[in-house]
Amino acid sequence: SESEYDIEVAGFGDEAERELPPAPVVAVVGRPNVGKSTLVNRIIGRREAVVEDVPGVTRDRVAYDATWNGRRFTVVDTGGWLPDAQGLAAAIAEQARLAVDLADVVMFVVDATVGATDVDEAVVEILRRSGKPVVLVANKVDDVGAESDAALLWSLGIGEPHPVSAVHGRGSGDLLDAVLEALPAEAPPETFTDLGGPRRVALLGRPNVGKSSLLNKLAGETRAVVDAVAGTTRDPIDEEIQLGGKTWRFIDTAGIRRRHRENQGADFYAILRTQSALERAEVAVVLVDAEEPLAEQDLRIISMVVDAGRALVIAYNKWDLLDEERRHYLEREIDRQLHNARWAPRVNVSAKTGRHMEKLVPAIETALEGWNTRVPTAKLNQFFADLVNAHPHPIRGGKQPKILFATQAGVRPPRFVLFTSGFLEEGYRRFIERRLREEFGFEGTPIDITMKIRE
Ligand code: GDP
Ligand code: GDP
């Protein structure tokens, strides 16, 4: 039985609906020595997976990025697990169940030179009952002469045996074609955040923090008004502004300017505007008034950015008005109240004097970089292997949840899927996030961690 828990790691408020499916998982199952890790090596095209001479030895890394004909998927070598079960048959059966739970497609590897064994038959039983797509691999078919061995595997009753030689590569292209065909339909390409053109910035903040002032200061002479929808008569709503040698598109600047004229308007509309600006933006600069204590509304706006999964920069404005005492208190306030967004770059600016304006662009660029960071699967799994080794999850009720493997499901923002053998408790998940940030940066971006639990 598999259940999914979506964990809002970095959020202050409600969970966001921004789950995208991870790269599909292809699990490789089979008895020891049939050639699973050789095949995995062949598929990922690197000598990365270690081929062990000792059967059943636990490998640190079990999941790898693979691409075939432009399609990305994750290959999982179940041979890397040493199941707790006693005896070969039980261990393989346990591996097959695990694979069935975790994978979108199972590659079942049989040694064609040996033929189907009782253990293979038992695995077939499990695979068949699962209803998961299975691609049957007849391995060690090193030459044409051995193809008749492969054909005998039709008798297993789970479809066509694909003759390959994992060692020489023979037949591996056809095999991968079959795997691709068995994969679930491809997810639609990632959203508008992939669009080209200038990076899109939302300048957010409650009334009177200085948004219009900052905008005017930034825009200076270089301001250019752009139309929201080409060819319509709607009000121009965005502005393109040159900063640090680049063009940036500031979202809903008309709203910022108009709101000002309209004497701020109702809170409700302010939230709607913030929401719609966020939908079109990639990165948000949240302006807060450094002179005043952080307000509920400031925190709410920051939560909205996090929940929308956008990159975040926090700008403390009106720095010119600060005295020593306030400055001192401010640091403690930030520490206490912004602990959930400690990863956001902070700049202390003054829209009035122009103080530290030049620090804004580097902060935005840092945040966008973090937002777009992808960690290779092998590196990620090495990281988790080390982490779990050094700091295993506490034992609860006699059980110790394990992280079997992890993949990064997407970027903008980075999203991770952890395949675990039990529920990871809150404290441990926060620890994971902290360590991920220490290791890989992710400055200025929320990160999203989902557990796929096998109980
Ligand atoms: P695993 O235990 O299933 O991961 O199997 P390995 O990948 O470690 O392979 C077991 C042994 O079979 C190794 O000595 C491999 O070199 C050998 N082997 C793997 N694939 C082939 C193949 O296609 N042809 C031949 N002749 N040997 C193979
Ligand atoms: P908005 O409602 O967020 O667009 O805020 P405005 O840009 O209209 O600014 C509100 C008030 O704060 C105005 O009186 C500005 O002159 C003032 N203000 C904005 N930025 C600064 C700053 O950096 N220092 C000082 N001293 N005043 C500022």
Image (spheres, rainbow, N blue to C red):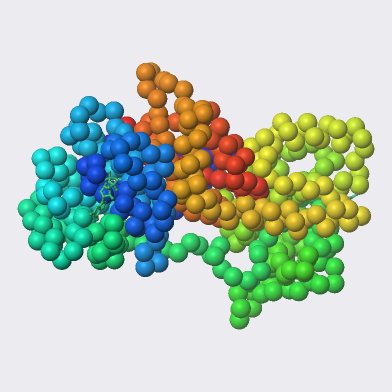
Is residue 266 shown above or below 3?
A: below
Which of 176/346 is in front? 176
| Left or right side of 354 for 223 | left
Task: Determine whether, in the image, residue 158 is placed left or right of residue 235.
Answer: left
Q: Position of residue 93 (x, y in %)?
A: 20, 37
Vertical arrangement, residue 240 with respect to residue 433, above or below: below
Residue ranking furthest to the top? 397
Q: Which corner quadrant of the image does residue 303 belong to?
A: top right
Residue lying at 71% horizontally and 31% vertically, measured from the top left: 336
Look at 31% across and 33% down and name the residue there: 82
Q: Position of residue 203 (x, y in %)?
A: 72, 56
Residue 104 in the figure: left or right of residue 448: left
At 62% across and 59% down in the image, what residue appears? 282
Name the side, left or right, on which 170 lies relative to 345.
Answer: left
Please provide percent x and percent y for residue 389: 48, 30
Residue at image point 51% right, 34% down: 387
Task: Tell me where residue 341 appears, x and y as whole percent.
Answer: 66, 41
Give the answer, above or below, for where 232 lies relative to 100. below
The N terminus is located in which quarter?
A: top left
Number of marks drawn: 0
Residue 91 visible? The answer is yes
Between residues 35 and 188, which one lies in front from this camera angle?
35
- The quadrant of the picture occupied by the C terminus is top left
